[in-house]
Image: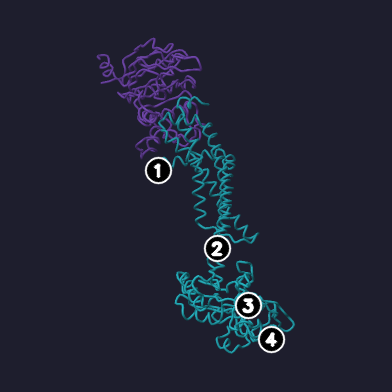
Amino acid sequence: MAPLIDVRNLKKTYRLGEVEVKALAGVTLRIARGEYVAIMGPSGSGKSTFMNLLGCLDRPTSGQYRLGGIPVESLDRDQLAEIRNQKIGFIFQNFNLLPRMTTLENVALPMLYREAAAPDANQRARRALALVGLAGRELSLPTQLSGGQQQRVAIARALINQPEILLADEPTGALDSKTGAGIMDLFDQVNREQALTVILVTHSDEVAAHADRIIGFRDGLVVSDQLRRPSANPAELAREAAR
Amino acid sequence: MNKLKSSIRIALGALMMNKLRSALTMLGIVIGVASVIATVSIGSGATERIQAQIASIGSNIIIVIPGSTTSSGLHLGAGNAVTLTETDAKELASQCPAIALAVPMVRGGAQVVYESNNWATMVFGVTPDYLAIRDLSIAAGSDFTQQDVAAANKVAVLGQTVVDNLFAGANPIGAAIRIKNVPFTVVGVLAPKGQSSSGQDQDDVILLPISTAKRKVIGINAANADAVNTIMLQATSAAQMQAAQDEAEALLRQRHHLQAGEADDFSIRNLQDLFAAQEASSNIMAMMLAAVASISLLVGGIGIMNIMLISVRERTHEIGLRQAVGAKTRDILSQFLVEAVTLSLAGGLAGIVLGILASVLISRMAGWATSVGPGAVLLAVFFSALVGIAFGYYPARQAAYLDPIEALRYE
């Protein structure tokens, strides 16, 4: 069985006027279904660029990216949008909730853009909110919630379409450590209970300690790849290793 | 369907966020639509008035007047010759199947006196069929009869204006009046008809039997005692108008012994054609006004485009997030198009209300007839939606093709 994420010699180059900036200098990496991965590295190491490529928000300059066997680099705008909608759940440092919409509407937003309309959209959004511990706050506006609660809404939104990967870019960066720990517990829970692949970018060792595997980035390259403990899905990993 | 509903809700929310800005943006459309509605209502009011005038003359009327006389090579105006006669009228009525009625007419002005009041008015010498042709009715008393014509009785039917000026409230029926010093008995009063298209008071008239009018009031033509000024014809139906005209021309040419190639010594006029031309010119006027009004609709559309571009800029981050959770190009496109159309449709509806108010005000203050039809309203709704789509498309496209990463980074 192919790995969920299979990245080969991925490069991303930005042009800033005359200067070429190599954000990614050739990354090769595999991540199996169900893994819990932390990506660490100093600012400018290319980890955010890598996350954007993994999340199909951006296209590589060269190299291959297969997501569940699909060659992502050859897809067009709307096909990428479809993948983001169906397979990927995003969590941002600054939550990115739409301020004029209620909590429930924010959570239900990805279902609005599904090809097949979900008739039970409201029900599902309610369940997702309950899962992140916000039952009863369905009609609140984001501004009426604390930072931690807003991030929980964002997680519920990321989970609503039952994605294959949860991508989190500094999910606790805007939160105090106690609230951040609560958020991390939520990630642990969805990784263990739903066997969801979780990939997060962080500066914090404390946050990274939640992950099973820590990948280090520097100057657009992978410089370390450390398996701290067996994944929650050891069978899959074993198959991966055998290839 | 669900998407559209949510697009509309998002659009309304966005518009409510900036109430003043939305209202000002709509103003251009409001003014444009209101002026289109007002001008179209003036135009169709004028058309309706012309049609009412056509109806007031009577339906399917053809007028025959004598042709111009040529006197030593000098053309005198049409109607000067004495070529038409009462006998012509009788023959037209009896021999032409497409002609229902034919009424000979003589005309003249006269001073009318009742007791100490006097009034100058038009005198028509006609036959009783005149009422039927002109679609006139008797309000009081009765019309004179064929016997009155045969016997040249001195009886008169008065128009309302004449009654108002001579009788000042007294009952005119049976009263003795003097027309050019000849005593007449009033037998009837015509129901009021109002102004003609040329602004003439159609009620300022006295009808007399044609025989009496010739002998006592207007005078007998020295060249031909049978001569009349006009023959009024009524075709059997609107479809028979052309046939009636052709039959009348053929019969009159034959009766006047005109050779082939010789010009008619009479001319036949169809009043409907005259009014159709007038109606067409008033339509052109209305269309020009509407064209001017639609320029302001265009300016309103540019205003919408401007605001939509600003709105897209302001909401770049929101667009980026929607893209990140899976919004496709057409999702974003339709969201902003719906917003632009909502803006322009709301402006259009307000404009319709304002336009109807304006046309009511115009007809009150200027006395112009106005009429707001469902067609004008539908047209206004259609055009304001069209303006929204046309001018909302470019900004919506800009939004739909934003790069998700850059849009997300935009603060």
Closer mark to the observer between disc 2 and disc 4 = 4
Closer mark to the observer between disc 1 and disc 3 = 3
Is A243 located above or below residue A147 in the figure?
A: above
Q: Where does residue A47 sit, x and y in percent of width and height?
A: 43, 16
Q: Nearer the viewer, residue A215 or B402?
A: B402
Residue of label 4: B182
At horizontal 68% and vertical 87% (from top left) the residue drawn is B183
Task: Identify the mark at residue B80; answer none if there is no mark.
Answer: none
Q: Using the numbered discs, state the Cα–Cα distance from disc 2 to disc 1 in whole angstroms.
A: 43 Å
Q: Work out whether disc 3 and disc 4 sit on a shared chain.
A: yes
What colouring method underlies this structural image? by chain
Mark sitting earlier along the chain (2/1): 1
Q: Work out whether disc 2 and disc 4 sit on a shared chain.
A: yes
Q: Using the numbered discs, state the Cα–Cα distance from disc 1 to disc 3 in whole angstroms.
A: 73 Å
Q: Nearer the viewer, residue B84 or A21?
A: B84
Is B278 located above or below residue B325 in the figure?
A: below
Q: Using the numbered discs, state the Cα–Cα distance from disc 3 to disc 2 in whole angstroms.
A: 30 Å
Residue of label 1: B1
Mark sitting earlier along the chain (3/4): 3
Q: Amino acid at mark 3?
A: Arg
Chain that is coloured cyan in the picture: B
Q: Is residue A202 left or right of residue A238?
A: right
Mark sitting earlier along the chain (2/4): 2
Q: Amino acid at mark 1?
A: Met
Chain that is coloured purple in the picture: A
Badge 3: chain ID? B
Closer mark to the observer between disc 3 and disc 2 = 3
Badge 1: chain ID? B
Q: Nearer the viewer, residue B101 or B112?
A: B101
Residue of label 2: B48
Q: Where does residue A152 sit, x and y in percent of width and height?
A: 44, 28
